[in-house]
Image (cartoon, rainbow, N blue to C red):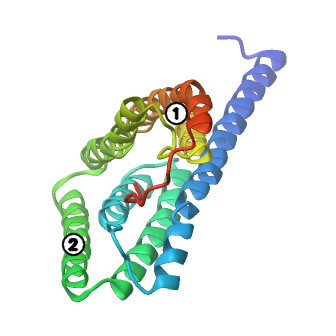
């Protein structure tokens, strides 16, 4: 092994550059994720203005809350070391999803209010069970594997949710239901966390975000292919459930 001063300086320099790139990718992922978290604001401004949830569904926010809680737990030192930026982005995301769900409950009719409240309680019960099992039954290494696979499954399901939108775009030959900036933010967030996971050699981060990156590329390519035709046809806008 070469312990000469130039070799040591080169090693330190490479390590510092790698850490800087890793930190930069994580910060970028947090920024792009924040754009996604605030994207439902127009929907909730409409709900508050009209005093009704109309035909919108709370399920995307309920599921996103559970996903954020699981991924936040994975990023905390109780489970994983050195992935604090995963914990920060998902704690912020959980706060947003909880606020959206609370607003939905406040403006829903009695039947929907009861249903969504029950689902919200169920989310916290499931998350509490995951926390208890991972802390009580596993050592740190096994706990990371257990929660890691849960987070991978949850993230893959989340990234797969736009498949229905992709199918609609292909079927209708219109990008009306696939906002460009939302698709772009999803792609950039996935790409950033994919790089973050690769630089950290963390399988549980780079695998689901790699899948998200591929799906993001598909959405952007479809947008580029169908957007011209959509503008020319000028399809009539419809009320659709936020996803």
Residue at x 49% of width, y 74% of height: 44
Q: Quadrant of the C terminus?
A: bottom left
Q: Is residue 88 above or below residue 125?
A: above
Residue at x 50% of width, y 68% of height: 43
**Hey, which quadrant is residue 51 in on the image?**
bottom left
Of residues 14 and 149, the one nearer the viewer is 149
Q: Is residue 123 above or below residue 177?
A: below
Q: Position of residue 124 (x, y in %)?
A: 26, 72
Q: Position of residue 206 (x, y in %)?
A: 45, 33
**Hey, which quadrant is residue 170 in on the image?**
top left
Q: Position of residue 121 (x, y in %)?
A: 22, 77
Q: Is residue 91 left or right of residue 54?
A: right
Q: Quadrant of the N terminus?
A: top right
Q: Position of residue 89 (x, y in %)?
A: 53, 57
Of residues 27 and 164, the one nearer the viewer is 164
- All told, the count of numbered labels is 2
Q: Is residue 38 above or below residue 49?
A: above
Q: CA distance from mark 2 to mark 1?
A: 31 Å
Say which of marks 2 and 1 sits in front.
2
Residue at x 55% of width, y 55% of height: 36
Q: Which residue is mark 2?
A: 119
Q: Assign a secondary structure to mark 1.
A: helix
> What's the mark number on residue 94?
none
Q: Which residue is mark 1?
A: 194
Of residues 233 and 156, the one nearer the viewer is 233
């Amino acid at each position: 092994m070469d312990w000469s001063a130039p070799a040591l300086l080169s090693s330190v320099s490479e390590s510092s550059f790698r850490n800087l790139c890793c930190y930069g990718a994580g910060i970028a992922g947090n920024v792009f994720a924040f754009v996604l978290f605030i994207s439902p604001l127009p929907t909730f401004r409409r709900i508050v203005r009209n005093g009704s949830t109309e035909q919108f569904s709370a399920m995307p926010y309920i599921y996103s809350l559970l996903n954020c809680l699981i991924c936040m737990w994975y990023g905390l030192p109780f489970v994983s070391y050195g992935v604090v930026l995963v914990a920060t982005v998902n704690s912020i995301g959980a706060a947003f999803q909880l606020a959206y769900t609370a607003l939905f409950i406040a403006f829903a009719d009695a039947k929907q209010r009861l249903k969504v409240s029950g689902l919200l309680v169920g989310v916290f019960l499931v998350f509490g069970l995951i926390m208890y099992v991972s802390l009580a039954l596993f050592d740190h290494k096994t706990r990371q594997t257990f929660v890691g696979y849960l987070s991978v499954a949850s993230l893959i399901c989340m990234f797969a949710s736009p498949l229905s939108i992709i199918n609609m775009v292909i079927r209708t030959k219109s990008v009306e239901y696939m906002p460009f900036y939302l698709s772009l933010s999803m792609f950039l967030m996935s790409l950033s966390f994919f790089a973050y996971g690769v630089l950290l050699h963390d399988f549980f981060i780079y695998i689901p975000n790699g899948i998200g990156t591929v799906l993001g590329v598909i959405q952007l390519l479809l947008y580029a292919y169908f957007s011209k035709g959509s503008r020319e046809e000028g399809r009539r806008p419809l009320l659709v459930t936020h996803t």
